[in-house]
Image (cartoon, coloured by chain):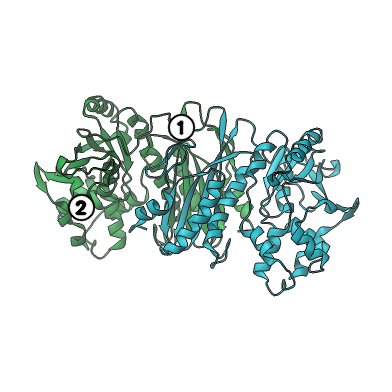
Chain colours: A cyan, B green
Amino acid sequence: MSQGEFDIIHKYFDRPAESEQGVTLGIGDDCAILDIPDGYQLVVTTDSLVSGVHFFEDVDPYRLGYKALAVNLSDIAAMGAEAKWVSLAITLPSIDEHWLSQFCRGFFALADKYNVRLIGGDTTKGPLSITVSAKGIVKRGQALRRDGARPGDLLCVSGVLGDGGLGLAVKLFSESCDKINNKQVFIDALELTEPRLILAQQLASYASSCIDISDGLSQDLIHILNKSQCHAQIELEKLPFSAAMKQQIQQGHISQLQAWQFAVSGGDDYELLFTVPAEKMPAFQQLISTQLANSELVCYQIGKITAIPASTQKESIEFSVDSKQAITFTHLQQPMDLDKAGWDHFK
Amino acid sequence: MSQGEFDIIHKYFDRPAESEQGVTLGIGDDCAILDIPDGYQLVVTTDSLVSGVHFFEDVDPYRLGYKALAVNLSDIAAMGAEAKWVSLAITLPSIDEHWLSQFCRGFFALADKYNVRLIGGDTTKGPLSITVSAKGIVKRGQALRRDGARPGDLLCVSGVLGDGGLGLAVKLFSESCDKINNKQVFIDALELTEPRLILAQQLASYASSCIDISDGLSQDLIHILNKSQCHAQIELEKLPFSAAMKQQIQQGHISQLQAWQFAVSGGDDYELLFTVPAEKMPAFQQLISTQLANSELVCYQIGKITAIPASTQKESIEFSVDSKQAITFTHLQQPMDLDKAGWDHFK
């Protein structure tokens, strides 16, 4: 965007530093220069959002700016890290000042909430897409990885499930969803997701593994199970739902089975899915219960990590778990095959 | 790219670690975890390349992969830093395995040369574009910024100028350029640019400011002059040209004036433009002359930094230098107005 690129950067993105936050040099040089405190490690994630693929072309730019940052901060949270800095590469078909100012309002609303500093990026001309790269810090050796789960660990989530998935369904299949009421609650869950950064830093002392739920509980759990070489059991009656979701079930707008399916496969919840060793659970529950005033710290135990049955173990050191067998669903102790239920009933 | 995204990442991007290079955790978790040695700072840059804007749609994918990384590593070099890690966000219209394997061959050829590790990224479906975010380390306080130039400092470049700009002209205006011979030399200069990382680490002890020439010597110099609040003088007879460019001039395919114009405004040279305090120049020249075997360390002095005339100084603490007055061109001590020459004669 040769004409006006520097003006745009200056006008929208180059904001005065309220606090240094480890930024020796921000926007306006070949690189940003950042200070990592001694004894800490850097964590880095990158996510792209492409128009027509990850968001609707007529998306509210405030919500797009917010979510482009939120999905990246959610990855930082999933490492048990503190979010610090972010780079933003934005490709725009043209300069629409109203659109851009709304985009920035959403982006910076979230950045300011968590004291995250924009330290650089690129502004180019082309089909609308956004690539955000977020950076955080974590005490050396304390990051929550996907490979730390062990049989016997308890499986937990950081909030209610399924609302994001139902929000997407409401937007994609409005006719099939005409009975759903309070639609905006679900659309908000989809578009204004809250990265669990406050919980994340508490988790470092308790959790053995962690991931954020972007593709769906089931699919993201498989990543933990693959890296940790374990299986898992999920107790469907323990899956947490929002008041709005419970209302849909009670009023018969969706079935209990469909609600479970949204929780398990819906995606876009951006809650943390983590494992806690059983012996640490009492202390973790104590932490949660004494800080219930902070809604960021509501967590639910939904199942447990199990060992891979000896009969199905392979000889190789590490192998991909069988995704059909790796997760067992139960309802009141009875096995239940959730694969046969759900999503396609809804269309 | 829901279907096959993980396969693609595994097949093309997740390469076995040959050395740790400070990577505690690479591809395959929510974030990469990186170790910054105590006493060092992190430098970060991000550049996007969009199809039809930054490269031709039929570009050789090897060269695209190479250049997407090269322009980012050039920014790391411009900080006097050591390149360490890189994230790659690639948006593809479809999976073309041949294209992707060639892209990766170009990308990793350069990454391997400088021992840079791919530590994460994102693979999405959409109009072809690439966003690379490179990270490097530099001793605390030693980074070469744009704001360190002072009047009397000598202005230097790390290699010949104008070849990249002529390469672009050859591709854009093939008819007007039909007389140019050895076209491939100029196209190679445009597409297979060499990031000056080896020189960069030597520069930290000598240079007072540095930038890489992406938009053209003149425009990039203005960034140094703005940040450093100085003016500059460029001696045209000192501008360094390649043997191929000299041949074009000698054979009358382009005029001397046009060659200067390519050097000053052409862009895409990706040489380092830096300033050296006069008292450090003898030691710097000693370093260069004793290491001439390494062609990375060929540098040319092309002018000097001057003070802003008292008459044009503003009262504000920092202001934008007047781009028409900030750079003075001379030829054999005589002032010369290069703005009136060049590029548009060529079309």
Query: Judging from the image, what secondary structure is the residue with disc 2 in?
Result: helix
Q: Is residue A347 above or below residue B77?
A: below
Label placed on residue B41: 1
Kind of residue indicated by mark 1: Gln
Q: Is residue B128 visible?
A: no
Q: Quadrant of residue B14?
A: top right
Query: Judging from the image, what secondary structure is the residue with disc 1 in?
Result: strand
Kind of residue indicated by mark 2: Gln
Of residue B208 and residue B196, the one placed in the foreground of this image is B208
Residue B128 in picture, x, y percent from top left:
48, 60
Residue A97 in picture, x, y percent from top left:
42, 62
Q: Going by the image, does A296 lie left or right of B246? A: right
Chain letter, disc 1 residue: B
Determine the residue located farthest toward the bottom in the rendered image.
A175
The residue at 38%/29% (across/down) is B142
Q: Going by the image, does B82 lie left or right of A41? A: left
The residue at 62%/45% (across/down) is B30
Distance from the alpha carbon under mark 2 to that under mark 1: 38 Å
What residue is shown with label 2?
Answer: B261
Q: Mark 2 or 1, which is nearer the eye?
A: 1
Q: Is residue B327 visible?
A: yes
